[in-house]
């Protein structure tokens, strides 16, 4: 999300990163906390 904020919007096209993150957040809201999707998304977005 920080990178999206730093880059700013691209008036020429939709930002695929933003669409992907929004889709992941929407999917996360729709599953129970023990769903395998939670672990998959945690691995995708975990940053050290």
Image: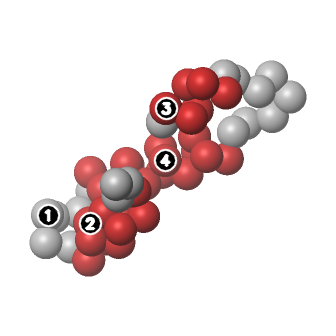
Say what secondary structure mark 1 lies in. Answer: loop
Query: Crowding at label 2, few (<14), some or many (≥20) Cα neighbours within 10 Å?
Result: some
The residue pinned by badge 3 equals 2
Disc 4/disc 1 C-alpha distance (Å): 18 Å
Mark nearer the viewer, 3 or 2: 3
Q: Residue at x 34, y 54 (%)?
A: 48
Q: Nearer the viewer, residue 44 or 25?
A: 44
Query: Crowding at label 4, few (<14), some or many (≥20) Cα neighbours within 10 Å?
Result: some
Q: Earlier in the sequence, mark 4 or mark 1?
A: 4
Query: Crowding at label 1, few (<14), some or many (≥20) Cα neighbours within 10 Å?
Result: few
**Label annotation for residue 21:** 4
Q: Nearer the viewer, residue 31 or 9?
A: 9
Contact? badges 2 and 1 (CB < 8 Å): yes
Q: Toward which corner of the image does residue 8 lie, by quadrant? A: top right
Disc 1/disc 3 C-alpha distance (Å): 25 Å
Q: Earlier in the sequence, mark 2 or mark 1?
A: 1
Disc 4/disc 2 C-alpha distance (Å): 14 Å
Q: Residue at x 21, y 73 (%)?
A: 35
Disc 3/disc 2 C-alpha distance (Å): 21 Å
Q: Earlier in the sequence, mark 1 or mark 3?
A: 3
Q: Residue at x 26, y 77 (%)?
A: 36
Determine the residue located farthest toward the right in the rendered image.
12
């Amino acid at each position: 999300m920080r990178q999206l904020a730093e880059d700013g919007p691209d008036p020429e096209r939709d930002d695929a990163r933003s669409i992907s993150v929004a889709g992941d957040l929407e999917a996360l809201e729709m599953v129970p906390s023990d769903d395998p999707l939670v672990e998959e998304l945690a691995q995708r977005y975990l940053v050290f």
